[in-house]
Amino acid sequence: MPSSRLSRRSAIHALGLATAWSISPLRAGLAAAATRDTPDFIDALVARMTLEEKAGQLTLMASAWGGDRAAGLNPPGGLSDFDKQIEDAVAGRLTGVFNGNGAAMALRLQSAVMERSRLKIPLIFAADVIHGHRTIFPIPVGEVASFEPELAQRTARAAAFEAAGAGIDWTFAPMVDIARDQRWGRAMEGAGEDVLLGRLFAAARVRGFQGDNLAADDAMMACAKHFAAYGAAEAGLDYSTADLSERTLREIYLPPFHAAFAAGCGTTMASFNEIAGVPSTANHWLLTDLLRGEWHFPGVVVSDYTGDMELIAHGVARDGRDAARLAFLAGVDMSMESDLYRLHLPGLVRDGHVPEAAVDRSVRRVLAMKAMVGLFDNPLRRIDPAREAARSRRPETMALAREAARKSIVMVRNQGGVLPLPRASRIALIGPFAAGPHDIIGGWSVYGDDAQGVDLATGLRAAGGHVTVVAGCAIDAPLPGGIAEAVAAARAADVVMLTVGESQDWSGEAQSRAEITVPQAQQQLAEAVAATGKPIVVVLKNGRALALSGAVRNAAAILVTWQLGSESGHAIAEVVYGDHGPQGRLPVSFPYESGQEPYHYDHKTTGRPQPPGPLQPYKAHYHDLPDAALFAFGHGLTYGKITYADLTMDRTTMPWDGTITVSARLTNHGARAAQEVAQLYIHDRVASITRPVRELKAFAKVALAAGETREVRFTLRRADLLFIGLGLTPTVEPGQFDVWIAPSAQDDGVHGTFELLQT
């Protein structure tokens, strides 16, 4: 087939990724640091530094005086070491700390450095502000279910407002890894399985964290992580190998990073995993040839937590000195937590193994980053204990948390219209997540507090509900008499709300699961309660897609509520009682069984695809399962009744430099208003590289009153048809394309075809 290749730069512009980055003041400042065209004061500082002080500027450590939950997430050492850490900072052995204990901690450290250090270079304070600071928003994958990038920008802006008020200059977020295996625990931190959503939410979160002015006291530097393909870990096992083609890397796993950089993200974090036998922390091709050479990224690359030290266990470094050499020469500017740069870089330079000019370049990048966030102008810019308290959990931020939680809820089943519930309903609220200050805020929250969150029982009662609460079982163990008590409560109620799923500690880093199912104790509880015959509404607590079975899968209604953060209970109650309709859509595919993983909607057909209908022999399917999802990517129900009809195109052929507009009519036949998410998918029928069965190219939220019909319209351009071709360059080929406007990746919706013409 004839083809026309675009340059990478042209393709990036076509995708709308390069313009913002090319004009970003942040990019200009960091680029200047990379080329020695830096402000005079930075060059003067570098000229005055000893090798030991330069290595110190490239060394980041966990705060010895950490936040309440920080020690459990990343153990930093005891509080008794804080005085030693102050002395390290004063001596120039430290560029900054992360996950510290707020403004009071930062004030002591920064004041000591500015009063007593030789060069008076301010420290930078970093933290894992993943989905909120003190006010906790839904976990990232849950928030992506809103299909509203603008919402993610607002929650990131609010998180920056709170966190910067506590002295934090830099957040290790957003995580932009594509996650196609739901066994991987860190799926909860990203945007799901789709590249378009990954790109849009990466850019939105960067804009939110960084604001309009990085030097403002309500902005933080963002860090796109983990570079790269961390989400492709074999078997969904955290830290494991990612062995994938360069085409897959470029087409699936790299675009969200490029989107983040296009939005102005000034830092990135090297990933733990290896790619094709080379750990990312030691991967010169990835961190230098691609990131610096091809993409011209001028910002700071930081290792993940002890990532450079782990090169020894990977088997590519002999010892700590060798690991420091490999990581630094590969392109890692800053070492996190291992202390290897401080210990070994000076000697490596003196022995001729690392050029001092390269060290100077990395130091200039770090100093430029500190200048960008305003630290040289005012080292105490964000450090004010009174402001920290004043910004925490303000009413408008809590209202945003409730809005975000509400919009993240996905109703995947509602047989017989059991939802919404009348407020007069007698509810038996059963399950380990029904009540209590636990499993509310979600995983990877350093500064959040379950005790300040709203549980489901509290939310329902505050909304006027009549609720009897019975735990029935623990998260992964039975309780004496628990099932009998739950069955009795169910028999006395009009409806059962069954809260089942995962503890928030079961998702996140190092939380891979071989079986992504509801734990046995909870499943047994569900079966016993279902035997009463009472209608069941499952309220699923999850940090990933789960493989549901039995009474849970067959419940009258299922709400996927993720881990919704501070306002969880209020948000769920508003949806359950119909004050707001559900409007979330799944950003991940829910499989029939764990054994289907990795599963993603945009898979290839294979040469022996299973046709519609009964399973056929010698076709691509499991012996006992269809090659499909139980609940598809993009699926989500409303309290309306939406139909799709009358796909129209303004033309059936797309000129090479033209467009084609595709539209459909959406009608709400229900009695309630609804927010429908119309999704545009394409399929390239014949190409030089096999193409997915569907690819999401656009979506739109459409508000439909009861009985209302509205037209939804999308415009496709040649750039929307790009793929990575035979030469590993962005390619567009003429030919026929299928197009759908549909409510999910597995729904036919309305369908048509068009042809791209080459002129």
Image (cartoon, grey):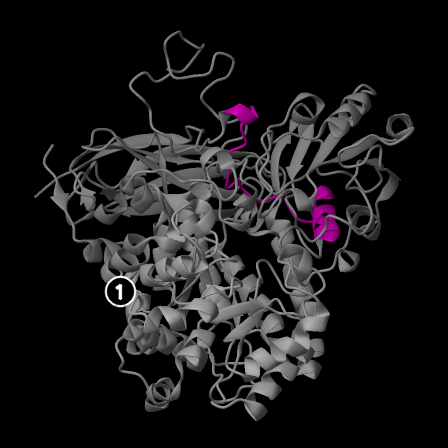
User: Which residue does the image show at 10% across and 41% down from the upper left?
Assistant: 758
User: What's the amino acid at mark 1?
Assistant: His
Give the magenta part as a residue range: 568-595
Q: Relative to the observer, which residue lies in front, 506 or 482?
A: 506
User: Which residue does the image show at 63% across and 27% down from the upper left?
Assistant: 548
In magenta segment, residue 580: yes
In magenta segment, residue 638: no
The quadrant where residue 451 appears:
bottom right
User: Which residue does the image show at 39% across and 7% down from the upper left?
Assistant: 617
The quadrant where residue 29 appears:
bottom left
Q: Which residue is labeled 1 in the image?
A: 296
Helix, strand, or loop for circle 1?
loop
User: Which residue does the image show at 34% across and 29% down from the upper left?
Assistant: 693
Q: Where residue 201 sits in the image (x, y, percent)?
A: 46, 54
Q: Main secondary structure of the magenta part?
A: loop
Residue 387 lies, with reference to residue 751, above or below; the image says below
Can the viewer see residue 675?
Answer: no
